[in-house]
Image (cartoon, grey):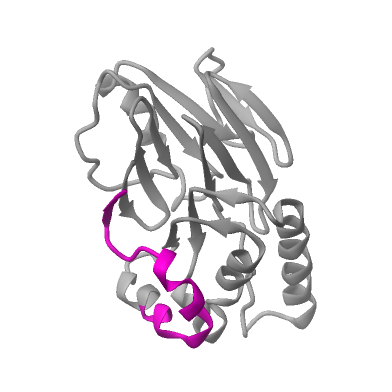
């Protein structure tokens, strides 16, 4: 398994027989084996998680499938799966489950080649100091309701927000996810252009018990 961080919340997962591309909207993709089917996941329609450019991938790759949040405009096609939150799909050899985001769209839980992957999309404990208490309380409740739906689950790799714009609150949702789920490999994301700011949170004592499983490199192979 090889995992490449493209930018922000976009990752390419290369397995023996399958390619998984999560939340691509920009950036240079590494060469992809044309013999492997490519599954493109878009968690929601925000500009930092989806771009119509994903459709151009079908011009460069011979076998592309799309799993898109149901609110993303898409052509009707046998290779397009509109995904609703809190749903399950057995499709094209994959098992796909979804959660409800605390912002927009859905979170993906994907089983491919016997491995489980978690991509949060915008599911996170979004606590902003400038927001009203009522709004922050809603995000707290909504995030932990979704977390309770997968508490105790195992993931071979998980992609989880650690957004430096949240400042002192950025690590809350990241750590609570790691407390709830067992993960062999964890990749922080949702940093926009501030990757260094995101990775600085790995120095916090709250993350110390998990550091051996958190990967800061842009390309990881295991």
Residue drawn 32% across the image and 22% down it: 36
**Of residues 70 and 147, which is closer to you in this image?**
147
Measured as percent of width and height from the top left, residue 37 is found at 37, 21
Measured as percent of width and height from the top left, residue 24 is found at 39, 43
Residue 219 is one of the magenta-drawn residues:
yes
Residue drawn 54% across the image and 52% down it: 121
- Which quadrant would the N terminus be assigned to in this image? top left
Residue drawn 68% across the image and 58% down it: 102
| Residue 122 relative to residue 151: left or right | left
Image quadrant of residue 33? top left
Indicate whether 172 appears above or below 152.
below
Measured as percent of width and height from the top left, residue 21 is found at 40, 38
Which range is magenta?
Answer: 200-222
Image quadrant of residue 191? bottom left
**Of residues 158 and 45, which is closer to you in this image?**
158
Image quadrant of residue 188? bottom left
| Residue 182 relative to residue 10: left or right | right
Measured as percent of width and height from the top left, residue 59 is found at 28, 20
Indicate whether 9 appears above or below 60.
below
| Residue 26 relative to residue 172: left or right | left
């Amino acid at each position: 398994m090889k995992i490449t961080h493209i930018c922000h919340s976009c990752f390419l997962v290369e397995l023996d027989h399958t390619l998984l591309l999560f939340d691509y909207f920009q950036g240079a993709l590494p060469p992809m084996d044309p013999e492997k089917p490519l599954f493109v996941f878009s968690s929601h329609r925000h500009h930092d998680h989806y771009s119509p450019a994903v459709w151009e991938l079908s011009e460069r790759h011979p076998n592309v499938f799309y799993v898109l949040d149901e609110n993303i405009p898409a052509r009707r096609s046998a290779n397009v799966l509109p995904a609703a939150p809190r749903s399950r799909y057995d499709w094209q050899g994959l098992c796909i489950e979804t959660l409800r985001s605390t912002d927009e769209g859905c979170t993906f839980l994907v089983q491919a080649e016997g491995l489980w992957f978690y991509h949060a999309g915008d599911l996170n404990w979004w606590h902003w100091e400038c927001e009203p208490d009522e709004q922050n309380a809603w995000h707290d409740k909504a995030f932990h309701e979704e977390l309770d739906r997968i508490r105790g689950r195992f993931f071979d790799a998980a992609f989880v927000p650690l957004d430096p714009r949240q400042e002192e609150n950025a690590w809350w949702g990241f750590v609570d996810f790691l407390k709830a789920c067992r993960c062999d490999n964890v990749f922080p994301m949702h940093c926009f252009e501030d990757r260094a700011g995101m990775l600085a949170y790995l120095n916090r004592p709250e993350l110390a018990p998990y550091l051996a499983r958190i990967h800061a490199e842009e390309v990881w192979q295991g």
